[in-house]
Structure formats: C-alpha cells, structure tokens
Image: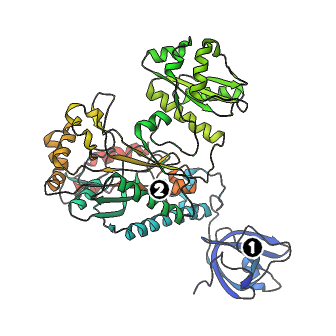
Amino acid sequence: MMRTHTNNELKKDNIKEEVKLCGWVQSRRDHGGVIFIDLRDKYGLTQIVFDPRHNKNTHAAAEKLRREWVVSVSGKVRDRKEGMVNPKLITGEIEIIVDDIEILNESLTPPFEVENNIETNEDIRHEYRYIDLRRPINQERLLVRHKILTSARAFLNKNNFLEIETPCLIKSTPEGAKDYIVPSSTHNGYAYSLPQSPQLYKQLLMAGGCDRYYQMARCFRDEDNRADRQPEFTQIDLEMSFVDQSDIIELGNNLYKEIFKACGKKLSGKIEIVSYSECMNKWGTDKPDMRFGLEFIDVSDIVNKSDFSVFNDAINNDGVVKCINVKGAAQQMSRKEIDKLIEFVISAGGKGLAWMKYIEGEFQSSVVKFFNEDVLNELKKSVDASNGDLILFIADKLKRTNNVLDQLRCKLGKDLKLYSDDEYRALWVVDYPLFEMTDEGKIEACHHPFSMPKAEDLKLLDKDPLKVTATLYDFVINGYEVHSGSIRIHDPKIQKKVFDIIGMSKEEVENKFGFLLKAFSYGAPPHGGFAAGVERLVMIICGSDNIKDVIAFPKNKNKENPMDHSPSLIEKAALVDLGLDLNNQTKAQLKKKG
C-alpha cells in the first residue's frame, strides 16, 4: 500500500510505529541543518523531519523539496521536543523522523499559496481551480456538500421515496429563464433543451403512479449570474402523490433537520409559517433573515397628520411611510454614521432617509418640529419607542419602500452584529398569489403556471385572477430562499384555464404542454413537492456569501470557465453535421480576436 495513515491520524498512541505517509509539501523549514516539512493531504497536516544524523540520503533529497511537490515518506513516529507541541493540529504532539522518501511528482511554483486566508483574484483561483481546491476551506465545502446529499438520500429512502432520473435532453418549455439548446444531428433544424428543472417530468411520474420520487437533479438556466446563482446547479428534487401542504411542510422540516444534523449544525427556534402578504408587510421581502428583528412598521396614517411635506407628498401620491425601530442604537449611531446610512439608502434606490432618536422621553431630530405633540405620542406608541431607540423612516411607493428598507435592515443586522454567524433560522412563506401583473400590463404566473389555486379561490379564476392565492410555498434560511414548491395542478381543465389567463394560445399550449395535459386526462393524482438548491444549502451552512465558493468547477460572471476556457468554438465539420450556420461562427471568431 502507498500509505499506512492519512495526515491527521497519528497521535501519541502511535509513537515508535513504522508508518508511511503521502501528500503535498505545504511548507519547508531548515533549522540548523535539520529540515522540517508539513505534509498535507485532504485530512490534515503531519510534521516530517529530515535529520542528516539520522539519514544523510533522505536529508539530501529533502534539500530540494519545494511547495506542492508530491512525496511519499516512510519513518518512525516520535514525540515532538518539549515546547514544540502544536495544539492547533490533531497531529501536533508527534512528528515523523524519515527513513525513506520518494518524490512522486514535482510542481512548478504555484500562483498562490494553499492557505485558507489568501488575497488572490477570483479568476486566477478559478483558472488554477485544481490548486485552489487543495485549500482546507474548499475541502470542507466539498465535504459539506457530500454530507447534504448523502443525508438527504438516506432520509428520503427511509421515507419510501424512489430515486428516479429524468431526461437531460428534453423539449423546450418556458420556465422563467432562457434554455440552453442542444442541436440534433439526426433532425437538422431541431434541438433539445437542457432542463431548467425536472418540473414536468416529476409530475408525469406522479401520473405514472410512482407516488414518491426524488433525484439529485442537474439543472441549467441561461440567466444573469449573481452571488447565489450559476448557469448549472443541483437540486434535491422531490414529489409526492395524495398530499396537501401540511404534509409537505412536515416532511420538509424533518428533511432539513436531518441535513443540518449530518453537517454538525442545528436549525434554531421554531420553524414559523408566514403568509406572503404578512412577510412583505413586516420585512418587505419574501426571504427575510429571521435571526434578528427590525420589523417594518407602517406609520402612514400617523405621520400624514404632521406638517412634514416629504411624508405628506409620498402618501398623497399613493405611497407609504414605513420605519424600523433600532432598539438602543441612538447612542451607537452618531450623526456622521447616520449620514452614511442616508448615502446607503440613496445608493439602494431610495430618495432619502428620515430619522428620530428617542432620548429621555422625547424625540430628537431636525424633523421633529413638523410633528405636534399628539402625533409624536401616537408615533411613540406605534413604534414602541423607549429610551435610546433610533427610528429610521422611508417614504416612497410601497414596492420601493419595502425594497430599500429591506436592504437597510440587512445592513443594520450585519453592522450592529444583531445575529450570530453560527445561527440558522428558517421559515416557510406560504399563500403566494398565483398571478402577478407585469409593468407592461400582462398577467403572468408568479412562480410558474403549474401551482394549484386554493380551493376557495377557484371561482376567482374567471372573475379576478390577480386575487387568486396558490398553494405555493418557499423555504427560507437566513435570508436565502432554499427551495420553492407547490401543490400542483392535476386537473387538465384548471391547467388549461391557467394557461389561458397568462395569454397562451391553444396552439402554443398544445405544442409545449400537450403531452402533459394528455397525461392528466388519464387520471393524474393530486400531488406536490419542492426542489431544494444544494449549492445554496452548502453556502449557508459553510457561511459563504458566494455560490461559486462551493462549486467544484464554477463559471465566472461571464459564464466562462477560466480553467478549461469553455465555452469554446465548435469545429466546422460538427457545425455542418448539425446544419448550423457557419457565418455565425466566423463572426464569433472575429469578435473574440477583437
């Protein structure tokens, strides 16, 4: 065997044992002729000693060792000398005195050190991702991903789910983003799409009587990259027949508890269930961070009685005034710091920020003079003002007020350290509207057109579709949407009605979804499920704020891989075989050459 132990195994109990270790040279130190290296593998570090008094040949070989060389060493485990113990390492009490060394591979000087805390350009790290992955923090992220997937599989298997793969070469169907297209060499001019999700196929599995399905589904979406978005990603995708929303919530809670337990973490507090409307009213977003308070308070009716024109004008123009009470922050926040908050609000899209401090029984601010005593008393009661509080106001249209105040709330939560990074708080957001109106005045599905309307709202489909509530739910942890799901439409008549409301013609419905409606007409059961984003879960559990950190080989903001230089041009012969236009490739080549 090439090794007897990994580099985090050996301890005082192993002293005097003959061992063989393999790994990379993390560092090399020459102390008065005795050479020390730290040998690293994915498990940890072991200190290796080359002493010319012990073995001249191995010492001579060690003189040329450099960082990231791959070596195999054989020797005996011994105590570290007094005062040389490293309590930060599992192997910190021992070292290996080397009898034999084999250099398995040399390395060029790496572009950056294999350390957790490095300041290296992201594109450089991703160009040399095979080196970047050696860093302990990235090994830990890959391990967390593995634990999430294995614990989810174990839980779902135990609960009678069947793992079934759905196709990756599918018919193009609208899912909210652009499809990635795969041209067919058999049928020139035709193409497959890569799935944005297995949505239709898992519904067809329910129609096929599979009852409980899951898969670790690869999904592909051609959309703008963000910190929590990549063009390809993985979902824990599941679906169940003969269930209602309460069944889904119960199963989801238990699944996430198992996942967090497997990762050595815990969801704290009660997992609340909050309606979409309440969520938007209290936090201005459908994915609030529940680790801290700072709920929004609508004070429009109160402040409209004041003489403060900024508030009056906003309310008279169909806007609102909302505020947050930052408890005890009046003394923490100087005028200079409040001015920085005003700058932040403006950069976030707001028109400005009004503020008041409540100190020793009275409000203090340059705007207080516009409020009479009665209005101030009402305001005090509404915001629950007590000594030392800082009240921050936004006045604007409802949507913009919510958006800006949400960003301000998150900034204050982080800046004032109102939560712990090791805390994980979750909630379910339910009762979403089925439809929403676009800026162009078109009705479209709020999430997707396959969510079942609430039974009591079915009559509104014909009368007032924008008032229809769906059995649709999101699961949110620490301000991130982890999954979205719903009870699906299983009745072809209702599904056709929804397609009609969002403006799809009969021809379009038949072309894109005819096979689904056909399946429903042969007795599909009521069913529902959700799809959890694996990368977002890893990101949350590992405390990262960038999804690229937790993907083995991520794409950059331009959807390129700096390591393998994909996407790349296709050979002309392959394009001819696919019946594609060669002129477009010529244009792409010229554009890339600049």
Alpha-carbon span between mark 1 and mark 2: 34 Å
Relative side of 577 to 99, left or right: left
Residue 356 point in image, percent of width and height = 64, 23
Asked whether 235 or 551 is in front, the reply is 235
The reply to whether the C-beta atoms of the residues labelled 1 and 2 are less than 8 Å apart is no
Residue 352 point in image, percent of width and height = 56, 22
Residue type pointed to by label 1: Gly
Residue at position x 50%, y 46% from top? 227
Q: Helix, strand or loop at disc 1?
A: loop
Q: Quadrant of residue 41?
A: bottom right
Asked whether 223 or 217 is in front, the reply is 217
Question: Does 430 sit above or below residue 164?
Answer: above
Q: Quadrant of residue 62?
A: bottom right
Tag count: 2
Q: Which residue is mark 1?
A: 92
Residue 248 point in image, percent of width and height = 36, 55
Question: Does 350 sit above or below residue 371?
Answer: below
Q: Which residue is mark 2?
A: 535
